[in-house]
Amino acid sequence: MGDLLMRLGSLEAKPRMEEGLKALEEAGAPKDEVARVRARYATLLRRLGLYEEAGRAIEKALAEAEDPFTRARVESEAGILEAARGRPFAALNLLVPAEAYFRSTEERPKEARYRHLRTLFRLGATYLLLEAGQPYRAPSWEGFTPPRPSASSRTSWSKSPGRPRIATPPCGWTPQASWPSSFPPPRERPS
């Protein structure tokens, strides 16, 4: 119920997810199941702006995740938390192995594809953080405003004059113009 409430943007989600997590732990649920629920709870905490509490929850979920699929899933959730905290290199250290796993696994192919796409989005948010220096922020819930990063929380690399810049494509550039000849051209989307 807590996960559904979180997806609907209800602030009631936090106590419900805490109840569900406690019930799983008391019932002796498998570690991987507890890790999945704890990672979702950490996501809720991140969305509420409770980054320190979310960090503790995600660390515990990483320790509980035993199977590689669950571990990659939790690493992906942990990566976007680090991007929200303004820590792009910590995020990349978590997201890169998760992306590699979801890209190459044959286990649960439909879910792996979905998780791979989510992880690619999270990698994109992390690269945006590297370039623009803006931590990832999920859309706000009605009645809740997430904390804004303070000037003191910005990392030193965001102010560094020597940090690398991403080149802007030249005028008239299209993906097809630079598409490697060994790959087929991208498919056109139907109108």
Image (tube, rainbow, N blue to C red):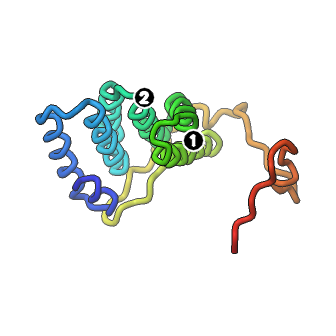
* Sequence order check, earlier mark of 1 and 2: 2
- Can residue 185 be seen in this snapshot? yes
- Can residue 134 be seen in this snapshot? no
Quadrant position of the N terminus in the picture = bottom left
Instruction: Tell me the residue at 40%/31% (across/down).
Output: 71
Residue 150 image offset from top left, x and y in percent: 46, 44
Q: Name the residue under label 2.
A: 68
Q: Which residue lies furthest to the left in this view?
A: 26
Above or below: residue 153 compared with residue 12? above
All told, the count of numbered labels is: 2
The label shown at residue 123 is 1
Quadrant position of the C terminus in the picture = bottom right
Which secondary structure, mark 1?
A: helix
Location of residue 85 by image quarter: top left
Q: Which residue lies furthest to the bottom in this view?
A: 191
Q: Nearer the viewer, residue 36 or 113?
A: 113
Residues packed near mark 2 inside 10 Å, few (<14), some (14 to 19) or many (20 plus): some
Above or below: residue 5 compared with residue 46? below
Q: Which of 34 and 145 is in front in this view?
A: 34
Q: Do the residues labelled 1 and 2 touch (CB within 8 Å)?
A: no
Q: Which of 182 and 92 is in front in this view?
A: 182
Give the distance between the C-alpha atoms of the residues marked 1 and 2, in whole angstroms. Answer: 19 Å
Instruction: Tell me the residue at 80%/45% (across/down).
Output: 183
Residue 137 image offset from top left, x and y in percent: 46, 51
**Residue flagged by tag 1: what amino acid is it?**
Leu
Q: Which of marks 1 and 2 is in front?
A: 2
Is 163 on the left or on the right of 51, as rendered? right
Q: Which of 152 and 12 is in front in this view?
A: 12
Which secondary structure, mark 2?
A: helix
Instruction: Tell me the residue at 32%/48% (across/down).
Output: 44
Residue 174 image offset from top left, x and y in percent: 83, 56
**Residue flagged by tag 2: what amino acid is it?**
Pro
